[in-house]
């Protein structure tokens, strides 16, 4: 952090810590669960409570800033990323895990200026010990791997379960396994999958069907760790395009992008 956005960074860390306390307490309690875009796209009252807390605090402190948030978008708010300072918030990334008490969930508070996510982003893993970056980085030096064989790759299923989407999802996994990947893991939280990559505990990550709020904070953490984040076409990452490839090296990211078949989820800013 540092520079003109230091105050934003501090606010994000404090809010992520407060939100984490609420989520940690609610994890083991009874929940009221509703569905959104599909039977596997879940929301609980805790998602709403945490989002309201984060937005109210940020709106009070930074009244001229703009906001994009998962549950507000589900209620019909438009996701438009302009050059203005914009907060991009996912109150609980890994809601399905949260519902099942599987303790792999995160709060993701991202911040973008000029359509680029900035350092002033914060994320908290639950359970976790740190307010920033969540997972302690640098477990091993960065990913020397430049080929797919021996790689540990992470992905997420995305919300759709129709046969055509599932076929493409499984066939993408199969392609990576045929190429020799040691394993493909689905942990239930896009932001934490990206965090694992930043921590050096996985070699690559890709997904179709995630959203800007799943990516906004985590992509900063990956880049700060020296990793690569790109579009599945091999071009630059587009936060609104609902797809991503990330890896420790550009070589590895390109190989994965080349192996994948596209699953078209549309764009966050065209809903
Ligand atoms: C979801 C999770 C899930 C991924 C979805 C995300 P949510 O976020 O990260 O693992 O497959 O694409 O939208 O709904 O739990 O915030």
Image: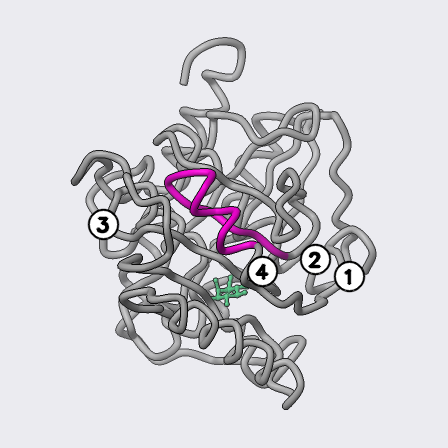
Q: Would you say 260 lies left or right of 99 here?
A: right
Badge 4: few (under 14), some or many (20 or more) residues near its Cα, within 10 Å? many
For the residues labelled 3 and 4, the Cα–Cα distance comes to 23 Å
Q: Is residue 261 above or below residue 234?
A: below
Query: In what quadrant of the picture does the C terminus appear?
Result: bottom right
Judging depth in this view, the residue of 50 and 259 nearest the camera is: 259
- The image shows residue 12, relative to residue 166, as above or below, that is above
Q: Position of residue 243 (x, y in %)?
A: 61, 56
Crowd band around label 1 with a 10 angstrom C-alpha radius: few (<14), some (14–19), many (20+): few
Mark 3 is surrounded, within 10 Å at the Cα level, by few (under 14), some (14 to 19) or many (20 or more) other residues, namely: some
Q: Which residue is mark 1?
A: 76
Q: Which residue is mark 2?
A: 73
Q: Could you give the CA–CA distance between mark 1 and mark 2, rounded to whole angstroms?
A: 5 Å
Q: Is residue 112 left or right of residue 184?
A: right
**Marks 4/1: CA distance?**
17 Å
Q: CA distance from mark 3 to mark 1?
A: 32 Å
Q: Residue at x 33, y 41 (%)?
A: 198
Compared across the picture, whether 31 is left or right of 157 comes to left
Pointer 2 local density, CA inside 10 Å: few below 14, some 14–19, many at least 20: few
User: Does the closest atom of ligand 1 sit within 8 Å of the Cβ of label 4?
Assistant: yes
Question: 251 or 135: which is nearer to us?
Answer: 251
User: Is the residue under label 2 in contact with that under label 1 (CB below 8 Å)?
Assistant: yes
Mark 2 in CB contact with mark 4 (< 8 angstroms): no
> Viewer-nearest of labels 2 and 4?
4
Checking the image for residue 194, the label placed there is none
On the image, numbered disc 4 is attached to which residue?
210
Residue where numbered disc 3 is placed: 128
């Amino acid at each position: 952090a540092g520079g003109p956005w230091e105050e934003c960074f501090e606010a994000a860390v404090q809010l992520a810590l407060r939100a984490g306390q609420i989520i940690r307490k609610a994890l083991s309690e009874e929940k009221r669960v509703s569905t959104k875009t599909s039977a596997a796209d879940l929301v609980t009252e805790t998602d709403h409570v945490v989002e309201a807390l984060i937005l109210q605090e940020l709106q009070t402190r930074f009244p001229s800033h703009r906001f994009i948030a998962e549950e507000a978008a589900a209620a019909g708010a438009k996701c438009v990323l302009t050059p203005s300072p914009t907060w991009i918030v996912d109150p609980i990334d890994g809601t399905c895990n949260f519902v099942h008490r599987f303790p792999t969930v995160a709060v993701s508070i991202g911040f973008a200026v000029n359509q680029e996510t900035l350092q002033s982003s914060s994320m908290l893993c639950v359970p976790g010990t740190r307010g920033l970056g969540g997972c302690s980085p640098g477990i091993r030096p960065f990913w020397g791997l430049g080929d797919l064989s021996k790689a540990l790759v992470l992905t997420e299923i995305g919300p759709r379960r129709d046969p055509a989407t599932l076929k493409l999802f499984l066939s993408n996994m199969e392609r990576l396994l045929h190429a020799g990947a040691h394993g493909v893991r689905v942990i239930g939280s896009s932001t934490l999958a990206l965090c694992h990559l930043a921590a050096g505990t996985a070699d690559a990550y890709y997904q179709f069907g995630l959203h800007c709020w799943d990516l906004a904070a985590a992509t900063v953490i990956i880049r700060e760790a020296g990793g690569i984040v790109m579009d599945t076409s091999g071009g630059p990452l587009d936060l609104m395009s609902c797809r991503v490839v990330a890896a420790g090296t550009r070589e590895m990211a390109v190989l994965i992008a080349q192996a994948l078949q596209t699953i078209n989820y549309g764009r966050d800013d065209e809903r």
